[in-house]
Each structure stands twice: as C-alpha cells, then as structure tokens.
Image (cartoon, rainbow, N blue to C red):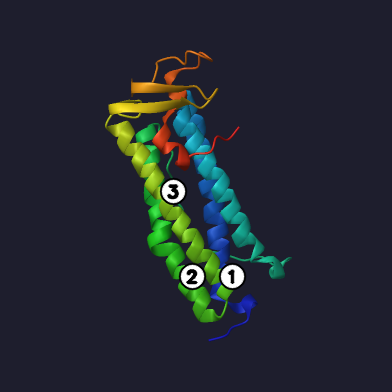
Amino acid sequence: MSIKFCDSETRVNLMRAFAGESQARNRYVFSADFSKKEHLQVIEQVFRFTAAQEQQHAKIFYDHLQELNGNTIVIDAGYPVDNYKDVDKLLRAAQHNEYEEHDDIYSHFGEVAATEGFASVADSFQRIAKIEKIHGDRFGRLAQLLEDKKLFVSDVESAWMCLKCGHVYQGNEAPKVCPVCRHDQGYFIRMDLMPDLSVVH
C-alpha cells in the first residue's frame, strides 16, 4: 500500500517518537542531576550518555518530517512520569520505558511505515528499537548492582576506573577516595562496564 506522507499514520508516529525521545532525554538529564546529588556520579554519566543518544534519535525522527515544514502535526499520546527520589527506581523506570519502546512501540511504528511504503522510516524505527533494548539492558544491569549493593563491590577481584582522572585500581571494592585526584567512590566504574559508557562532560 502506498499513501501520501502528508496523509500517513507514519508522520503522526514520527512526531510521537520525536516527542517521546525529547521527553526521555529530559528525564535522563533530571535523573543524572539527582544521581550526582546522591554521589553516584557513575550513574549520572550513564544517564547523560543515554540522554545524548536519545537526542540523536529525536533528530533522526524529526529529520524524516522535513518535507512537512510549516505544518503542525497533532498527536494523541501518553508519556510516563518518573520523578522518583530514588536512583534505583529511576533506573528501573528507564529500563521499563526503553524495553517498551523496543518491544511494542517502535516495532509497531516500523511495521506501519513499511506497510505505508516508507522504507527508510521503517528502517530507522527498527534500528533505533534495537538500540533502546541496549539502553534497557544497561539500565537494568546498573539497577541490579545498586539493589544488590555491588555497584562498588565485587565478589572477585576486579579493575575499577576513576571517571574523573582515569586511575585504575585492582581489588574487590572501589576505593572510597581516588588516590590520584581525591574524588569520591561515586566516580568509580568496573572496567567491564566501560564499553557501555562514554564519559560526557
């Protein structure tokens, strides 16, 4: 089935996705700010890193709408309120929302776009859905470590890196204070989590 873009459900889904990614970015920035106040700078950095990726997703969806410049697209959609004062809950809420985008929302939007004849839009939805799954997995792993009180403690000797200066420490627990830059334990991350994290300043 081929349909004009200006009459399509896909254009509405793109605006829903743009709005959703924009809100996710802001929620993660707010969560990062709260994590920093809780002296969990490693969690702060993960939220900021993910927020930057959500901003890029928003741009991808928004760019697909370029031919409708000057128009207004009215959407009917619901978005979550995750204003918890608990880092564990913020991580679990983020995990849930990312999985929902992967499992249901973007998969459906991709199918609609393909049916309506918008292959490049369908491809964006499908590829970004896979990224949201990675986001959900990362948030879930960090939430589990925090809940198990193992974010800075390991059952086996591990390497830990200070995100502030790059000092690497080997042991079962991250140092309470970095011996190089004197920043607190909240800046340390397990080295095996490093592929999941880029430091954002």
Mark earlier in primary sequence (1, 3): 1
At label 1, the amino acid type is Arg
Mark earlier in primary sequence (2, 3): 2
The vertical placement of 68 against 151, above or below, is below
At label 3, the amino acid type is His
Could one spot residue 59 in this view of the protein?
Answer: yes
Which residue in the protein does label 2 denote?
110
The vertical placement of 22 against 29, above or below, is below
The vertical placement of 101 against 42, above or below, is below
Distance of label 1 from label 3 (alpha carbons): 25 Å
- The percent position of residue 101, horizontal first and vertical second, equals 43, 58
The quarter holding residue 94 reads: top left
How crowded is the residue under tag 3: few (<14 C-alpha within 10 Å), some, or many (20+)?
many
Instruction: Kindly state the secondary structure of the residue where label 3 is placed.
Output: helix
Which residue in the protein does label 1 denote?
11
Mark earlier in primary sequence (1, 2): 1
In the image, taking residue 165 as reference, residue 172 lies left or right, namely left
In the image, taking residue 145 as reference, residue 10 lies left or right, namely right
Depth-wise, is mark 1 or mark 2 nearer the camera? 2
In the image, taking residue 1 as reference, residue 66 lies left or right, namely right
- The percent position of residue 125, horizontal first and vertical second, equals 51, 65
In this orientation, which residue lies closer to the viewer: 149 or 73?
149
At label 2, the amino acid type is Gly
Instruction: Kindly state the secondary structure of the residue where label 2 is placed.
Output: helix
Distance of label 2 from label 3 (alpha carbons): 19 Å
In this orientation, which residue lies closer to the viewer: 43 or 177?
177
Residue 135, labelled with which disc? 3
What residue is rendered at 48% in x and 70% in y?
Answer: 110
- The percent position of residue 138, horizontal first and vertical second, equals 40, 44
Could one spot residue 78 in this view of the protein?
Answer: no
Distance of label 1 from label 2 (alpha carbons): 12 Å
Q: Do the CB atoms of the residues marked 2 and 3 lie less than 8 Å apart?
A: no
